Image (cartoon, rainbow, N blue to C red):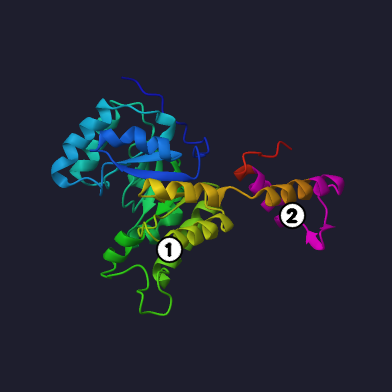
Amino acid sequence: MTVERRSPLEPWIPAGPALLFCPADRPERYAKALDRADMVILDLEDAVAPGNKSSARDALVDNPQDPDRVIVRINAAGTAEHDLDLAALEKTAYRLVMQAKTEDPAQVTAHGLATIALIETPMGALRAEDIVAASNCVGLMWGAEDLVAGLGGSSSRYADDESEPGEYRDVPKYVRARVRLAAGAYGKATVDAIHADIGDVDGLVAEVRDAVALGYTATACIHPSQAAHIRDGYAPSPERVDWAHRVLDGAAEHDGGVFALDGDMIDGPIIAQARATLTRAGQPPTD
């Protein structure tokens, strides 16, 4: 079948901020996952055992879902599974992939599909700026566990008996920041990593709050219960939305110049933050 692919020049904006991973070899979960999250990442890579890769691709083809709400995580370039994944995608209407362990822009441009490049290896982290510049790369996501494994390490977060229990260690923090900067420099989307401790709601909420403050586009998750917390975190409060409207009203009144609001100085960067707030609230400014 002929599939219309997304133009590489079209900015990608997810259907919402909560992106839920679902093993592609569990088609009975597809619809349930879509019901709980804004978008679903049908995973052909880590979530599928090596012996189930073929059946996962068959399930992907035989159980079509709304292509506007599905991302397909494909295996890393240079593997036989990667080529088989691409062949399976040709039989579907899915047009957005997440490419595992991306390390070079040529791995993205080789297939031409709209791609969220997953930065989760040391080499990928060093080349994030080049990767996001690829014409069909619509965004970046980062992953901590594969990154640390690639460094020969054993833990991405501090343990309970260390000084900052549950917090990322310095290298994962650095890669998280580098990925955000690289995507921001090219005006492309950034997806924050999963919070693997499903029961740690406070930790998830704190990370989502930080992601929003830094302009992340979305956050990935591994359990349906996490999706609601992500949505809540990305949704500005009514008070914040009101503030943003008043900032833009003031900017219009002062022709974009500096002015005071509630005792604070409002200038260009604050006006830009107000615009971003309204966009997250589903009220993007039209001027």
Nearest the viewer among 280 and 181 is: 280
* Above or below: residue 63 compared with residue 273: above
Q: Is residue 181 left or right of residue 220?
A: right
163 or 58: nearer the viewer: 163
- Coordinates of residue 222 in the picture (x, y in percent): 35, 50
Region of the chain picked out in magenta, as a range = 249-278
Q: Amino acid at mark 2?
A: Gly
The numbered mark, 1 or 2, whose residue comes first in the sequence reads 1
Q: Which residue is mark 1?
A: 175
Provide residue 15's location: percent of width, then percent of height. 50, 37
Mark 2, residue position: 268
Mark 2: give few (<14), some (14-19) or many (20+) Cα within 10 Å. few
Tell me whether circle 1 and circle 2 mark residues in contact (CB < 8 Å).
no
Residue 255 in the figure: left or right of residue 146:
right
Mark 2: secondary structure: helix
The vertical placement of 12 against 264, above or below, is above
> Which image quadrant for residue 283?
top right
Q: Residues within 10 Å of mark 1 (few under 14, many from 20)?
A: many
The picture places residue 162, in percent across and down from the top left corner, at: 38, 79
User: Cα distance, mark 1 to mark 2?
Assistant: 28 Å
